[in-house]
Amino acid sequence: MMKKKRIVVGMSGGVDSSVAALILKQQGYDVVGLFMKNWEDDDTDEYCSSRQDFIDAASVCDLIEIPLEIVNFSTEYQKKVFSKFLMEYKAGRTPNPDVLCNAEIKFKAFLEHAMKLGADYIATGHYAQIRKFNGTYQLLKGEDGTKDQSYFLYRLNQEQLTNTLFPIGHLYKRDVRKIAQDNNLPNSSKKDSTGICFIGERPFRNFLSRYVPHKPGKIQTQTGEIIGEHIGLMFYTIGQRQGLGIGGTKSGLDQPWYVLEKNIATNTLIVVQGHDHPKLFQPTLSASNLTWISGMAPHCGWVYSAKTRYRQTDAPCTIEELDKIKCRVGFAQPQWAITPGQSVVFYESKVCLGGGIITQ
């Protein structure tokens, strides 16, 4: 008798990973659930839901009759994700920890641990798809365009994709909810998680100020007029409107203020008025720390599309300069609030090619 393939599913306690595990169990695989604990500092019910998430994951695994293990990756998370997260903020950039977490924890530490458990594959509840094309594994967008998570997965490589399954990538969120309801999963109506556990619902500024020194400074217009005071540059990001504390109007323009630039040298926050202020739009960007899913870089001069932030509409672009560690990208239409520290991710139709960290 042929042995069933073993698949270890990353169980978050949410409906997506729960339905992923259910689908694999119904398909006849030997399924094992694995709950990852990635954060221990200040892990309380007030802000971090990990305890309730574990209870939800355990309830689902009990119902669909699969074992559940728990593994603590908090040391790896501190070293490989959170330390880089803080380093970026100290440098005045706005990082995306979900990108690092996927590359370093969910598809590295988790994958290695799962293989020790005898796994043939790992699986998660991400809205993305994988296909093999001409001997190469490709990462595709999730079928549900409103939930597609390929942007956060662009740093995955061939080895990781070879050993990974995305069981719900071909489904729409509404279908995932219905499957959960039809099978009486206890978390079928659970809200989607917002953000990352170590921040949770806590006030972000209070959290970050515990780890990164901050210094108040002036808020200025482009002409140098001082119109307020910021509480520390690390608390602001390009394009930010809320929380500037400079209500009212200047120059007779009845429009809100937006962050244009953070001048680290002078500790000054530069702002402009109006969402469509021309200075908020940039026709080009530079990026470094490039990774390509196929292992091969795309072609200079070819037309691709790119996102410079999650949920952004794909923007036509060309890669104008490219070497092993950095690239220069030109857009057909200038892009709004390009933010250093965020990721630019390239696509060819539904295929995610890879990307890098925006430097300017």
Image: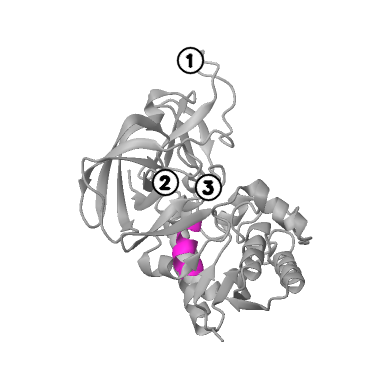
Residue wearing tag 2: 350
**N-term-proximal mark, 3 vs 2:** 3
Q: Which amino acid does label 1 sit on?
A: Ser
Tag 1's secondary structure?
loop
Which of the labelled discs sits on residue 251, or is there none?
A: 1
Tag 2's secondary structure?
loop
> Is residue 335 rendered magenta in the image?
no
**N-term-proximal mark, 1 vs 2:** 1
Residue bounds of the magenta highlight: 97-107
Q: For the N terminus, give its image quadrant.
A: bottom right
Which of the labelled discs sits on residue 143, or is there none?
A: 3
Q: Which of 85 and 265 is in front in this view?
A: 85
**In x, y percent, where is residue 360?**
32, 43
Determine whether label 1 and label 3 are within 8 Å by CB: no
Q: Distance between the residues labelled 3 and 2?
A: 9 Å
**Badge nearest the viewer, 1 or 3:** 3
**In x, y percent, where is residue 6?**
55, 78
> Mostly what secondary structure, the magenta segment?
helix
**In x, y percent, where is residue 145?**
53, 43
Q: Mark 3: give few (<14), some (14-19) or many (20+) Cα within 10 Å.
A: some
Determine whether label 3 and label 2 are within 8 Å by CB: no
**N-term-proximal mark, 1 vs 3:** 3
